Amino acid sequence: MTRHLALALAVGLAFGATAELSAQARAGPRDLTLAEALRIVEERQPILAMASARRQLATAQARQDAAVTNPTAEWRREGASSVSGTDAFLTVTQPVDVTGRRLALRAAARAIDTRMLADSTTVARAAQAEAVRAYWRASLARALLGLAIEQRSDAERLATTDSIRACEGAIAEASAMRAALEAARARLAESGAAAEWARARAELGRALGMSEDSSLDVAALTPIVEAPTIEAAWTPDALLAQARATRSELTAARAALEATRARERAATRGALGDVGFQAGQKRTGGQSFGVLAVALPIPLWNQNRAARDAAIAERRLADAELRAVDVSVSADVAAAAASYETLLAARPRGSTSLIARADEVARIADGAYGAGGASLLELLDARRARADALAALLRWSADLRLAALDLVRATGRPFTDLLEKP
């Protein structure tokens, strides 16, 4: 009797620990939504501020290169030791770009600003995509942890019950030992799932630009019952056309090419430097005279050949990079579409019914084992089959969400398209 009471107390403690853990999970902070995660990225991710600063730096430098040269004021006195008197000059010299070199540099500056804005958009989209990916992985980790907790609870309950039945002589002691072994395995599996959940939360915090803390709880992933509407019948050509029209990487590459073309024009026109126009006054012998002068640089030794060659090479490089980016975008779209279609083709017919069938298998096995109509191994196999089926469905649901994310990113669509998806 005393041993039975001790076993009953163990059962109560096991149930109490499980209930306490569940209560703590329920009493935790409010779950972070995907929309809130995207907003936090915009507000707190440091790489976005870095991208903005880089844009400001590059644009300011390009504007400075295209700036108009300031005039030069000169006061000069000649013949200071001459007995015939001195000459005093007061002149202003203004260098003038007569070839239009600075106009080309201004066009380059505008193209550079467009490029840096597109680069900032690329950085922002990459940060948002990483945050969405980390969010779904954390959500999956929490769902798998919940499944592991459920498995551990069931295994401990079975081990405690079989221990009592073995003491009563209802089952063999080896069967009770096997149930206890299964409970120990389930506890180890739960600890691994808990560690993965902790890692996923830390990764989510890093992706959001904030430290991992209690405010980063996310809801457990729910199985997808119906495919997301993002699977709308898009042809490969339509997907690629949309990507080419909206991907910021292509916008940046096109703007970079335009900037190099403008700099090439500037280098060609730079063979002739600024012409200096001078105007002022000369005072000599008590009389004042006007002064006009023009200074024309002669491209005799330096015809800006090296700068022109560099500009041509830079333009060829930008043109090749544009083609490379276009190839990369095409590959991204093809891979994302193929991945999404493959996962969609493997969609379980009736995810809800799959969950129901898995629960039914475990329920029947429990009933049969309790009535003596099934062995312990058959019960454990049924429970494990249920857990494996649910875990596979959760992972497939996460993979489909991530494939939808890749498709949205590859085609340049806004990530808000993912908010209404399951």
Image: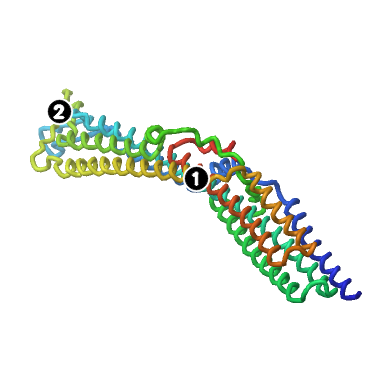
Image side of residue 321 versus residue 207, left or right: left
Question: Mark 1 falls on what kind of element?
Answer: helix
Image mark for residue 145: none
Query: Label 1 is placed on what type of residue?
Result: Ala
Quarter of the picture containing the C terminus is: top right
Q: Residue at x 25, y 32 (%)?
A: 104
The residue depicted at 71 percent of the width and 68 percent of the height is: 183
Q: Nearer the viewer, residue 292 or 164?
A: 164
Q: Are marks 2 and 1 in contact (CB under 8 Å)?
A: no
Q: In the rendered image, which residue does mark 1 sit on?
A: 403
Q: Which residue is nearer to you in this view: 133 or 239?
A: 239
Q: How far apart are labels 2 and 1 at the CA level? A: 70 Å
Q: How crowded is mark 1: few (under 14 residues within 10 Å), some or many (20 or more)?
A: many
Q: What element carries label 2?
A: strand
Q: Where is residue 284 in the image (x, y as percent from the top left)?
A: 15, 28
Q: How many labels does the image show?
A: 2
Tag 2: Cα neighbours inside 10 Å, few (<14), some, or many (≥20)? few
Task: Determine the residue positioned at 64% across, 64% down.
Answer: 189
Instruction: Check disc 2 and report the residue beneath it.
Output: 293
Which of label 2 and label 1 is nearer to you?
1
Query: Residue 305: percent from the left, percent from the top?
Result: 14, 42
- At a point 77% along the width and 75% down the height, the residue shown is 172
Amino acid type, residue under disc 2 in the picture:
Ala
Residue 219 in the image, given as x and y percentages of width and height: 66, 48
